[in-house]
Amino acid sequence: MKHLATLLTPSAILLTTSLCLAGADVTLDQLPAPVRTTVERETKGGQITDIERDTEHGQSIFEVEFVLDGKEYELDIAADGQLLERRLD
């Protein structure tokens, strides 16, 4: 029985850690106003494909994926609406 617990404990820790690292899906309507303003400005003319709320270094950030002119982009936006990063995916 001790051997089984020894084998299962690391697996449980890895599963719990990966679940905690996954962001929560949100809709455009659920975004705080400053974040929504930034999203609308930065994705103008594009198609939003995914929005997630995540936590990095204890701070909420919003990760937005969108397609513009056939290219996939990702934005990282702070809860106050500050654009932290824009990258080509």
Image (cartoon, rainbow, N blue to C red):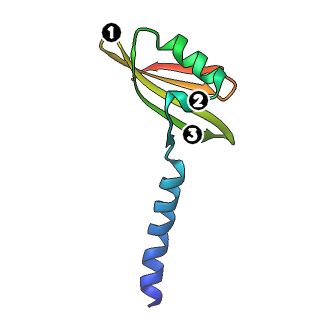
Among numbered discs 2 and 3, the one appearing first in the sequence:
2
The residue at the point 52 percent across, 15 percent down is 40
Q: What element does badge 3 sit on?
A: strand
Work out whether 44 lies above or below 19. Answer: above
Residue 84, percent from left and from top = 61, 22
User: Which amino acid lies under the numbered mark 2 shown in the image of this protein?
Assistant: Leu
Circle 2 residues within 10 Å: few <14, some 14–19, many ≥20: some
Disc number at residue 31?
A: 2
Marks 1 and 2, Cα distance to the nearest angstrom? 25 Å
Residue 37, percent from left and from top = 60, 16
Among numbered discs 3 and 1, the one appearing first in the sequence:
3
The residue at the point 55 percent across, 37 percent down is 53
**Residue on which the image places disc 1:** 69
Q: What element does badge 1 sit on?
A: loop
Marks 3 and 1, Cα distance to the nearest angstrom? 27 Å
The residue at the point 51 percent across, 61 percent down is 16
Marks 2 and 3, Cα distance to the nearest angstrom? 12 Å
Work out whether 40 lies above or below 57. Answer: above
Disc number at residue 10?
A: none
**In this view, the mark in front (1 or 2):** 2
Which quarter of the figure is the C terminus placed in?
A: top left
The residue at the point 47 percent across, 82 percent down is 5
Residue 55, percent from left and from top = 61, 41
Circle 3 residues within 10 Å: few <14, some 14–19, many ≥20: some
Q: What element does badge 2 sit on?
A: loop
Which quarter of the figure is the N terminus placed in?
A: bottom left
Disc number at residue 54?
A: 3
User: Which amino acid lies under the numbered mark 1 shown in the image of this protein?
Assistant: Asp
The answer to whether mark 3 and mark 1 are in CB contact below 8 A is no
In the image, 47 versus 7, the foreground residue is 47
